[in-house]
Image (tube, rainbow, N blue to C red):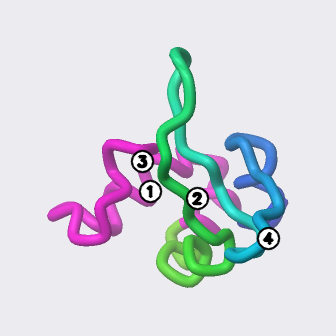
Amino acid sequence: MTPNEWIRANYYVVDHDIMGTVIVWGNQQGFYAIYTPIDKFIEFFEVPMKEALQARTDVKQAIRDSDPENVRGFNELL
């Protein structure tokens, strides 16, 4: 599985007219008005995602661990 495939399997992804293919962040109650282009998300986290996928470990935790200070702001969204 590639990072792109993992994102599509785990998040709501749509084609946005202006932003391209994006992740639409949300929870069980609904969706936030936050969109992240898939290519940018992969650019930020491709290495930890690939490593976790190859090791068959928790990809979300690998992403969090790669940004422990939450500088990129995704730790709570995951």
Q: Residue at the bottom extreme?
A: 43
Based on the picture, tell me whether residue 53 belongs to the magenta stretch.
Answer: yes
What's under tag 1, amino acid-wise?
Answer: Ala
- Separation of marks 4 and 2 at Cα, in angstroms: 32 Å
> Pointer 1: what residue?
62
- Which numbered mark, 1 or 4, is in the foreground of this view? 4
Q: Secondary structure at mark 4?
A: loop
> Residue 17 has which mark?
4
What's under tag 2, amino acid-wise?
Answer: Ala
> Pointer 3: what residue?
61
- Separation of marks 3 and 2 at Cα, in angstroms: 9 Å
State yes or no: discs 1 and 2 in contact (Cβ < 8 Å): yes
Image mark count: 4
Q: Which sits earlier in the primary sequence, circle 1 or circle 2?
A: 2
Q: Which sits earlier in the primary sequence, circle 4 or circle 2?
A: 4
Q: Residue at x 55, y 51 (%)?
A: 59
